[in-house]
Amino acid sequence: MRATPGAHEITVKETKMKMLPEHFEHMRAALAPIDTGRPEGATLRRYQWDLVRQAGLIPWLCDTLYKYLNDEHVQTALNRLVK
C-alpha cells in the first residue's frame, strides 16, 4: 500500500516526511533513552538500525509503518532522530 502524496506529511527540520507525527514521536520515545552515541567503527546507518532492534521496534515497523511507508521513509526518520 502506497501513501497518498501529501496525506501524512510532517515537517521536521525543513524536510517533509510522510510518516505520521505520532509514529515519529513513538520512534523518538523508544530510541532516545538508548541512544548513547555511535561506537567507534560503526557506520551511522548500522548504529541507527542496531538501536531500532535494541528498542524492539522491528515488529512495530513491520506491522505499522510498512503499511504506508517504505525503507526510504523510515531511514529519513532515523536520520532525523539519530545522528
Image: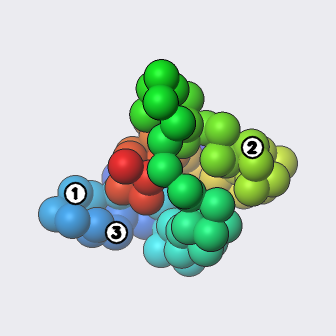
Cα–Cα span, label 2 and label 3: 25 Å
Q: Residue at x 16, y 63 (%)?
A: 14
Cα–Cα span, label 1 and label 2: 25 Å
Q: Residue at x 56, y 57 (%)?
A: 35
In x, y percent, where is residue 18?
41, 56
Q: Quadrant of residue 64?
A: bottom right
Pointer 1 residue: 15
Tell which of 82 and 61 is nearer to you. 82
User: Mark 2 vs mark 3: which is more N-terminal?
Assistant: 3
Tell which of 73 and 6 is nearer to you. 73
| Element under disc 2 | helix
Q: Which numbered disc covers residue 23?
A: none
Between disc 2 and disc 3, the foreground one is 2
Looking at numbered disc 2 in the image, what kind of residue is underneath it?
A: Arg
User: Mark 3 vs mark 1: which is more N-terminal?
Assistant: 3
Q: Residue at x 59, y 50 (%)?
A: 68
| Element under disc 1 | strand
Pointer 3 residue: 10
In x, y percent, where is residue 55?
74, 56
Looking at numbered disc 1 in the image, what kind of residue is underneath it?
A: Thr
- Horizontal arrangement in the rendering, residue 54 relative to residue 12 (left or right): right
Check disc 2: other Cα within 10 Å, few if <14, some if 14-19, many if 20+: few
- Residue 34 visible (yes or no): yes
Q: Residue at x 49, y 50 (%)?
A: 37
Q: Quadrant of the N terminus?
A: top right
Pointer 2 residue: 53
